[in-house]
Amino acid sequence: MDWVKIIHILCVMGWMTSIFAVPRAIIYWKRDWDRHSANGPIGDLTFRLYRFSAGLGVIAALTGLWLAWTLGFPGWVWLKLGLVVVLALHYVWTGRLVIKAQRGVFEDSDRFLRIFNEISVLVVLAILWAVVRQPF
């Protein structure tokens, strides 16, 4: 079971990298697009990071569900799973932003993207609290 935990934590760390970095990278991608009107290295890297981390997110979810099953799904796990769903929806929304950016469509302001990015930090803090405190 320790290996499942190790794989889970490793994949969560990789997925979190994308969740935290991609919205911020879109800001720089937007600025680069304004200067060059083309997808440059920033856009390519942002897209690749997002796409790579999708697989890590799936593995993290599957190993997390496996761990939850072995624990019998106590109350705190349901809280964590609910928060992970919120984070997954945030990730999907980020993916929509990436797809639009590939077409040169940047509808959201830098300020919106910064706030959007910070929402994920708050959700992750809530997840960590639920795992460490196991309130119920």
Image: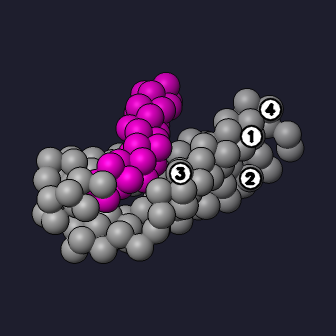
Q: Position of residue 97 (x, y in %)?
A: 38, 67
Q: Is residue 23 magenta?
A: yes
Is 118 left, or right, of 11 in this rendering?
Answer: right
* Mark 2 or mark 1, earlier in chain: 2
Spatial CA span between label 3 and label 2: 26 Å
Spatial CA span between label 1 and label 3: 25 Å
Spatial CA span between label 4 and label 2: 12 Å
Q: Is 82 situated above or below 7?
A: below
- Quick one: label 1, few (<14), some, or many (20+) residues within 10 Å? many
Name the residue that disc number 3 marks.
114
Name the residue that disc number 2 marks.
79
- Quick one: label 4, few (<14), some, or many (20+) residues within 10 Å? few
* Mark 3 or mark 2, earlier in chain: 2
Residue found farthest to the right: 136
Span highlighted in magenta in the image: 1-30
Instruction: Identify the disc placed on residue 133.
Output: 4
Spatial CA span between label 2 and label 1: 7 Å
Instruction: Give the residue type that dot 3 points to.
Output: Arg
Is residue 16 at all visible to an observer of this figure?
yes
Callouts 3 and 4 close, C-beta under 8 Å: no
Instruction: Give the residue type that dot 4 points to.
Output: Arg
Spatial CA span between label 3 and label 4: 29 Å
